[in-house]
Image (spheres, rainbow, N blue to C red):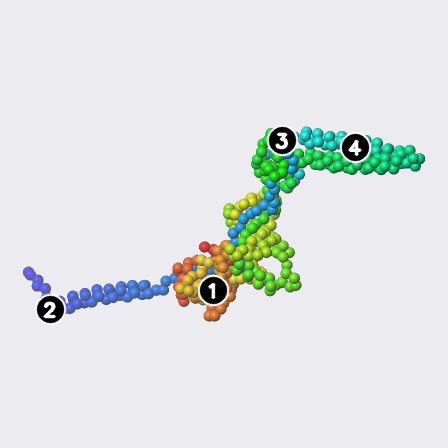
């Protein structure tokens, strides 16, 4: 027996595909709506490192290029003629004042002393004989046994011998000096150069006397540098404002300065200014200044180049910020400040000089600027992630040693 299924109305067959398509479309719309909600969710605030500007006591300084010179340089020459018998130093030694350097053959000088001494004794004997004649003729003149002319001659002979004794004694002193000068000693303490003549050479004294060696004093040493005319005028105006009464010399002011060698980092050494030339060089527009430096340890070699830093103001308190935290916008300089709601704002500033540690002086606010204070917070790291008028997640920077720092790169 064959079963026949009931017939389905044509309208029902046509409606099912429409319901199926509607269900699919509804699911797609629901999925799309849920995706839109996820995409519009606000992202977290970016993390940035913030720090406070710092206050520090500063002194304005000018930088110059200079050089070291010895406080004394002596050319050692012989004062008498003779052959070099002995050299008592090694080239480059450190010598003390009065130390024996060269010794000339002393025999000729001793012979001259002995001859002059013997001559003075001969004159002494002749003087004694003449004085006896004077005494005898004095008595004979009283009795008429001798003439007055004979007495006068005896007196003249005695005076002549006395004068010749004095001359020969002065010659003895001169020859003794020559003997002393045959031992050539160091006139100053310092480092000696090489011996220009060796043992056995003849040394002439006078206009043709040769150079034996040189000695350079090592303590103290001088630092010379040239100050330009503009810096000099600034300093002179400052003196006029602070000086009372008679002007003081540079040595009386006892002004300190710092300097460093080419191999030094910064300006680790210190000295005192003690001399300035009395006029400006019209060719260069500079004036030469000198400072004196203690060199007990022998660190400084005359002739070396140095960098010099001289204070030109009284101490003052300045606000500093890392130079890397300062941004530029055409002719404006600004930093990114973070307010109490952690929102980034722009703070226009006027930067000053850059210090050796990478900190920049922030000049006092002027015009529309607000400036900076140690209470402010500024972005020091992550500047590229911070956007003006948008919040950030601030992380405090580590304070520098000895002060509350704005951070380091």
For residue 148, side relative to residue 217 (left or right): right
Q: Residues within 10 Å of mark 1 (few under 14, many from 20)?
A: some
Q: Residues within 10 Å of mark 3 (few under 14, many from 20)?
A: some
Q: Is residue 342 visible?
A: no
- Above or below 13: residue 79: above
Where is mark 1, residue-wise?
A: 350
Query: Between marks 1 and 3, how big is the CA–CA gap?
Result: 75 Å
Nearer to us: label 4 or label 3: 4
- Pick the quarter of the image with the C terminus: bottom left
Q: Earlier in the sequence, mark 4 or mark 3?
A: 3
Q: Secondary structure at mark 3?
A: strand
Residue 70 x %, y %? 58, 45
At 42% from the left and 64% from the top, the residue drawn is 331
Nearer to us: label 4 or label 1: 4
Where is mark 4, residue-wise?
A: 123
Residue 24 x %, y %? 21, 64
Query: Between marks 2 and 1, how big is the CA–CA gap?
Result: 86 Å
Q: Secondary structure at mark 4?
A: helix
Residue 401 x %, y %? 53, 54
Query: Between marks 4 and 1, how big is the CA–CA gap?
Result: 95 Å
Instruction: Please give the label number shown on residue 107.
Output: none
Q: Secondary structure at mark 2?
A: helix
Q: Earlier in the sequence, mark 4 or mark 1?
A: 4
Instruction: Please give the label number shown on residue 10.
Output: 2
Where is mark 3, residue-wise?
A: 83
- Above or below 153: residue 402: below
Q: Earlier in the sequence, mark 2 or mark 1?
A: 2
Q: Secondary structure at mark 1?
A: loop
At 69% from the left and 32% from the top, the residue drawn is 109
At 58% from the left and 35% from the top, the residue drawn is 195
Do the numbered discs 2 and 1 sit on residues whose CB atoms are within 8 Å? no
């Amino acid at each position: 027996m064959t079963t026949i299924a009931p017939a389905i109305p044509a309208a029902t067959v046509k409606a099912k595909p429409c319901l199926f398509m509607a269900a699919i479309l509804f699911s797609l719309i629901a999925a799309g709506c849920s995706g839109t909600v996820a995409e519009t969710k606000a992202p977290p605030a970016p993390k940035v490192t913030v720090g406070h500007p710092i206050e520090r006591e500063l002194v304005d300084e000018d930088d110059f290029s200079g050089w070291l010179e010895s406080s004394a340089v002596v050319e050692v020459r012989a004062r008498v003629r003779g052959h070099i018998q002995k050299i008592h130093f090694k080239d480059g030694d450190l010598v003390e004042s009065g130390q024996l350097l060269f010794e000339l053959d002393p025999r000729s000088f001793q012979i001259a002393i002995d001859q002059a001494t013997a001559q003075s004794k001969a004159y002494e004997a002749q003087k004694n004989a003449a004085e006896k004649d004077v005494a005898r003729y004095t008595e004979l003149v009283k009795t008429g046994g001798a003439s007055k002319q004979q007495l006068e001659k005896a007196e003249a002979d005695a005076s002549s011998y006395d004068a010749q004794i004095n001359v020969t004694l002065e010659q003895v002193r001169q020859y003794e000096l020559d003997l002393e000068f045959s031992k050539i000693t160091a006139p100053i303490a310092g480092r000696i150069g090489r011996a220009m003549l060796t043992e056995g050479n003849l040394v002439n004294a006078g206009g043709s006397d040769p150079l034996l060696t040189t000695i350079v004093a090592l303590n103290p040493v001088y630092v010379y540098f040239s100050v330009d005319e503009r810096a000099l005028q600034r300093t002179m105006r400052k003196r006029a404002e602070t000086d009372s009464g008679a002007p003081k010399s540079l040595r009386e002011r006892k002004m300190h300065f710092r300097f460093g060698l080419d191999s030094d980092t910064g300006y680790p050494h210190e000295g005192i200014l003690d001399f300035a030339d009395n006029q400006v060089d019209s060719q260069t527009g500079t004036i030469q200044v000198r400072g004196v430096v203690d060199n007990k340890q022998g660190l400084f070699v005359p002739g070396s180049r140095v960098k010099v830093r001289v204070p030109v103001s009284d101490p003052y308190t300045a606000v500093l910020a890392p130079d890397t935290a300062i941004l530029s916008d055409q002719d404006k300089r600004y930093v990114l400040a973070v307010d109490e709601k952690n929102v980034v704002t722009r703070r226009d500033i006027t930067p000053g000089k850059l210090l050796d540690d990478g900190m920049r002086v922030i000049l006092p606010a002027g015009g529309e600027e607000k400036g900076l204070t140690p209470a402010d917070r500024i972005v020091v790291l992550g500047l590229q992630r911070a956007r003006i008028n948008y919040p950030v997640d601030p992380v405090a920077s580590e304070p520098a040693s000895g002060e509350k720092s704005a951070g380091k790169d």
